[in-house]
Amino acid sequence: MKQPQLSGVSRALALAGLAMALLAGPATSQDLLKSFEERTTVHTLKNGWTFLIVERPVVPVFSFCTLADVGSAQEVPGITGLAHMFEHMAFKGSPNLGTRDAAGEKKALEELEAAYQAYNRERLAARPDSAKVERLLAAFRDKQKAAAAFVVQNEFDDVITREGGAELNATTDTDKTRYFFSLPSNKTELFAFLESERFLHPVFREFYEERDVVQEERRASVESQAVGRMMEQFTAAAFSAHPYGNDIGGHMSDLQSFTITDAEAFFRTYYAPENLLTVVVGDVRAQELIPLVERYFGRIPARPGPAPLRTVEPPQIVEKTVVLEDPQAQPFYMEGYKKPANTHPDQPVYDAIDDILTGGRTSRLYRALVRDKKLAANVSGYTGFPGTKYPNLITFFVTPAFGVQNEQVQAALRDELERLKREDVSDAELARYKTRAKAQLLRQLRTNVGIAIEFAEYQNEYGDWRELFRSLDRLEKVTKEDIRRVANQVFQKSSRTVGMVVHKPQETPGSPQSSPAGAARTGGGAR
């Protein structure tokens, strides 16, 4: 006999009951997985774009996340920062959105790019003619003004807001770029049009103006912040070959030089449909949404996806230290150790180590450094720095207390790492980790946006969204012996990279520190 269908509210209550049972222990992650499998449809278009549709009719809204399998790890010298730059450009619209005259604007943008290419070639020449550079720059500025006259600013955003949209945003990191927003459930065709439109034929309008914005973001987050400057040098030191060593924001010289032509080539390579994935979650029906997806996203021609990343970071054989001296900054300390990609079978063990060391006020590093020894104001950790797809770092971040030196923090931190290597963690610590990990997952599954992002991440990284729930089974199997084994493998001096911000008082003329000998004694490693 066919089982009675649950209403949207009943399904939500049933899911909440499964979640509580999972935390309590008797239920398994398979119960939660089954509840989602019954409501999830996977559909791949002929052009290669994959869609996951999760029916969750709790309230009359839906959210989605489009994930492009590209980040700063795919950048090469000359175009660093371009993945982040394209994320900005994806909100500029298309020939049908954001322009007063598509044909006129197309011609104006072609003339603009030709003018910029001429200026850029002369500017970057081995022996540039300064007068010619100025003339070419003036000509480019004229073309920029002409192109700007066609722009209807923020039309893409305004349409979404006007139609009841919310949570419009995007993020770029080392391994992926995500785009997401939410709409009322009667706006599925609008979603299909807007999201397909910007990846069918994006228009690179206001490119050079937006490039200035990206440069300013770099100045604010990296160049004007001692910790930002140190982290950039820390990752460059930790990854001598792999592009994880590049800052997501890009090098300033690249941000001042890459072009619309570069961005178009980047788009054609990394935004091929087979390199894209969209998860739609909420008050939608797969049988109604799939025809819309076929109609709008099916317009995009198939093209070959990008080649796999070739560069592999060689084994680290020496400890590396980066020291940034700054007269205004307070001390800051970070220490990272090489580890496998987050898809490695031992990832739940690394997560357990991170949680036991830095997970809240009961964690070992908080109790030792903050509560007991009063050496730090804050401690935190991360098991996928700066990315997760390729071998990365388990990293610890410490803000020393006022008057405390980085060396004191370093000694206390390493005492705890050595303790983890020689002694088993307690049953209570291991149980707390497993409970917190489950609770964190369930918190992420409370909202449509949270589900969309998590499903997209696991589908992209593991090739199957179900791995999100199977990860619960893997964490349940973590033992105290696993933690000691992995701690002894990872916490080795030869695989360690250290970063410090050191408060150095302002030097005055004639002081010993300002002499050549004093300058020679100061540590380095950072610009």
Image (cartoon, rainbow, N blue to C red):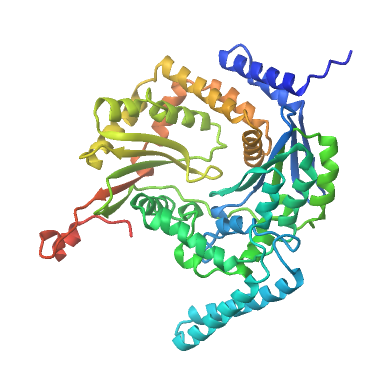
Q: Quadrant of residue 418?
A: top left
Instruction: Give how far across and how far down residue 161 sits, in percent.
Output: 67, 47
Residue 306 in view, yes or no: no
Residue at the extreme front: 162
Residue 499 in view, yes or no: yes
Q: Quadrant of residue 145?
A: bottom right
Judged left or right of residue 357, residue 122 is right
Instruction: Give how far across and how far down residue 43 sits, in percent.
Output: 79, 40
Asked whether 142 or 270 is in front, the reply is 142
Question: Which residue is pictured at 82% across the width and 19% down the height?
Answer: 5
Asked whether 447 or 319 is in front, the reply is 447
Q: Quadrant of residue 63?
A: top right
Q: Is residue 106 above or below residue 310?
A: below
Q: Which quadrant: the C terminus?
A: bottom left
Instruction: Give how far across and how far down residue 117 sits, in percent.
Output: 58, 77
How many marks the image carries: the answer is 0
Question: Which residue is pictured at 60% across the width and 47% down the height?
Answer: 169
Instruction: Give how far across and how far down residue 181 sits, in percent.
Output: 66, 43
Q: Which quadrant: the N terminus?
A: top right
Q: Is residue 360 above or below residue 61?
A: above
Judged left or right of residue 454, residue 367 is left
Question: Which residue is pictured at 36% across the width and 56% down the height?
Answer: 224
Q: Is residue 449 above or below residue 497?
A: above
Judged left or right of residue 259, residue 466 is right
Residue at the extreme right: 1
Q: Is residue 151 above or below residue 360?
A: below
Asked whether 420 or 367 is in front, the reply is 367
